Image: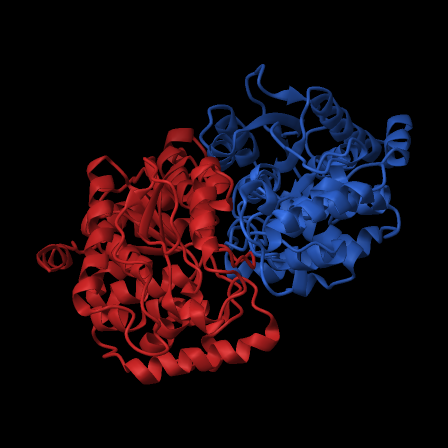
Chain colours: A blue, B red
């Protein structure tokens, strides 16, 4: 628990001086005031995170955590459990959406095995941090014990801190795990207070007639475990999963180093909620990449006070919506940094006040 | 008129065979069906435009047309007319938002002077196609005569065709012109039938108390000129401007070469409406980059049947919203082209039908 406690205590406050300078410069750039819309608000927010008046985010990373879920036994998904391992192998050969979108964004990928159930040949390009062959079934008891939950969080922290040491300045957390939309729905219900009926979606493509069953499993998980919703570690231990804990840890660690973290879809936002319980100030370093088509996602973002930048009806996970948003984040930073001011360009300013 | 007539007749039909193959491949990729949301619909549409089942758009261009507007005399804007020239100079030294965003998108820029009123030192990096020192004042008569309107359209066509010959496969049209939101509002009212009160906005940042005056000028322009709203050339000649005509011509010419054109904000969408009157099939090659904060933009997009991909409250023009959307367009194309199929990756498919 030592690392966790230290990191949580070390999240710096947002730098209001940098925000002020950034906002002043934004209004001097050769464009009508406010005309870059949400890009302006975004880079000003990032200036506060980075404590830099002209932030430049050039070392981008997505960490993809893969893990299995005991609740997959309950028939809550449309894919067999082996798909977690198969997709991890697909990530290795760059065949998945996250590979393509990360390459396009100029972002590096790390692959982390937090608890993939099916065996696969050992590989240098997968970071092995297995906490077991998947979580226990949350429909009948807790996903993991408290010590394992702490270990999951600290694993994500360690990996994000290593990347921070190597210069990373923009992070997204992604995942793969058959069953993890069920775990995430349960976490979102626990933390936001919304009901399983409104939060639970069809995940990766569950047949509509099986959705009611998935909702019942989420209700059962909440009833059986009744987590302490003020305690992020208890929520994680109760409802899982290993990858969600690692994502939450990575988010908190990034915040401790002033690194903006772009949140992806429902699983990423469940991890963000756990991070917000463990370290409330970590929310200041979160950016919502996109609004997922999955119903529970909007409840999670609302609880976090985040408004997403993309709304493209995506629901793929892996970190795809977050990495796609990297371009928007960079556009916001580059316009503030690279555009000329009215004075520099010799352009006349507006006659009226705005 | 010869070029205009030839190009209009030469817009090919969308290729339904390519659409079918693209849609089939999209559903075989290693992701839940439909989970890339609007990226899937977008690349399938582009496959039809390009007549390629796996389109790749790697040669990107934004053509920025600058021109002045006689209606600026009416006090409809917040910046003096010299700003058109000053911003053209700013584009030359890469100080404007469009420079930064085009560089980030890996897109080339061309700068075209269609009728900038204020003098500036001649420069190799500005394509001179002046049709006059700005349009006439649309509040008292037509912006230009019919022959000049045809010339404006054909100029945009020529430039887009030259780029097409050099391999361009993705186009955005941008602009700079003090007074051109007034001209665009009038065009949007004429073509959509919406009223000046609902269409006219504060442009680059007009003081709210001057908005009513701008609305009156738009009403006057419509009343004085009463264009034939079934004739795109007459709408252009009546309501201007030179740059809007060139943008419309470039859009039509791109369509004739199966090149997708990303539409930007209100001025770009006014040009798109004129293109749609002159060559209705050109709409099949349009992509709405973003939804501008300017009220009339949504009416124009609705008339064109286009749903934008970004909603970031931008209202800058220059082509900025369109170029920012290039990343989304590329993401759509690259995921279809580069992702592995379930069969290729050895990943198990879903148990249930979606």
> Which one is nearer the viewer's eye here, A348 or B286?
A348
Asked if A29 appears above or below A100 in the picture, the reply is: below
The image shows residue A83 at horizontal and vertical percentages of 53, 35
Image quarter in which the N terminus of chain B is found: bottom left
> Where, by quadrant of the figure, is residue A218 drawn?
bottom right
- Can residue A318 be seen in the rendering of this structure? no
Image quarter in which the C terminus of chain B is found: bottom left
**Residue at left offset 65%, top offset 64%:** A353
> Which one is nearer the viewer's eye here, A22 or B297?
A22
Residue B172 placement, left or right of B238: right
The image shows residue B192 at horizontal and vertical percentages of 35, 76
> Which one is nearer the viewer's eye here, A117 or A176?
A176
The image shows residue A122 at horizontal and vertical percentages of 58, 15
Asked if A162 appears above or below B154 in the picture, the reply is: above
Residue B14 placement, left or right of A148: left
> Which one is nearer the viewer's eye here, B319 or A244?
B319
Asked if A151 appears above or below B201 in the picture, the reply is: above
Residue B12 placement, left or right of A233: left
> Where, by quadrant of the figure, is residue A285 drawn?
top right
- Can residue B338 be seen in the rendering of this structure? yes
């Amino acid at each position: 628990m030592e690392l966790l406690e230290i990191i949580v205590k070390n999240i710096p406050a947002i730098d209001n001086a940098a925000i002020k300078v950034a906002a002043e410069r934004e209004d001097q750039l050769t464009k009508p005031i406010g005309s870059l819309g949400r890009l302006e608000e975004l880079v000003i927010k990032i200036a506060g995170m980075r404590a830099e008046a002209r932030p430049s985010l050039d070392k981008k990373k997505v960490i993809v955590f893969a893990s299995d879920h005991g609740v997959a036994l309950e028939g809550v998904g449309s894919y067999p459990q082996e798909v977690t391992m198969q997709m991890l192998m697909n990530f290795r050969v760059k065949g998945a959406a996250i590979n393509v979108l990360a390459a396009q964004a100029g972002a590096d990928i790390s692959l982390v095995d937090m608890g993939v159930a099916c065996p696969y040949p050992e590989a240098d390009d997968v970071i092995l941090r297995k906490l077991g062959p998947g979580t226990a079934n949350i429909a009948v008891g807790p996903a993991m014990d408290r010590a394992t939950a702490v270990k999951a969080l600290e694993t994500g922290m360690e990996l994000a801190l290593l990347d921070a040491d190597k210069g990373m300045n923009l992070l997204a957390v992604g995942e793969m795990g058959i069953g993890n939309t069920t775990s995430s729905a349960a976490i979102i219900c626990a933390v936001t207070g919304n009901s399983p009926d409104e939060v639970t979606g069809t995940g990766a493509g569950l047949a509509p007639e099986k959705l009611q069953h998935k909702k019942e499993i989420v209700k059962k998980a909440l009833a059986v475990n009744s987590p302490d919703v003020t305690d992020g570690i208890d929520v994680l231990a109760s409802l899982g999963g290993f990858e969600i804990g690692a994502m939450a840890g990575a988010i908190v660690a990034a915040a401790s180093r002033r690194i903006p973290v772009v949140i992806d879809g429902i699983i990423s936002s469940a991890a963000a909620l756990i991070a917000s319980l463990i370290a409330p100030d970590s929310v200041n370093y979160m950016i919502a990449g996109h609004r997922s088509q999955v119903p529970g996602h909007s409840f999670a973002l609302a609880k976090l006070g985040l408004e997403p930048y993309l709304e493209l009806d995506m629901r793929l996970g892996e970190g795809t919506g977050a990495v796609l948003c990297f371009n928007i984040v960079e556009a916001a930073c580059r316009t503030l940094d690279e555009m000329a001011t009215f004075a520099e360009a010799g352009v006349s300013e507006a006659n009226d006040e705005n």
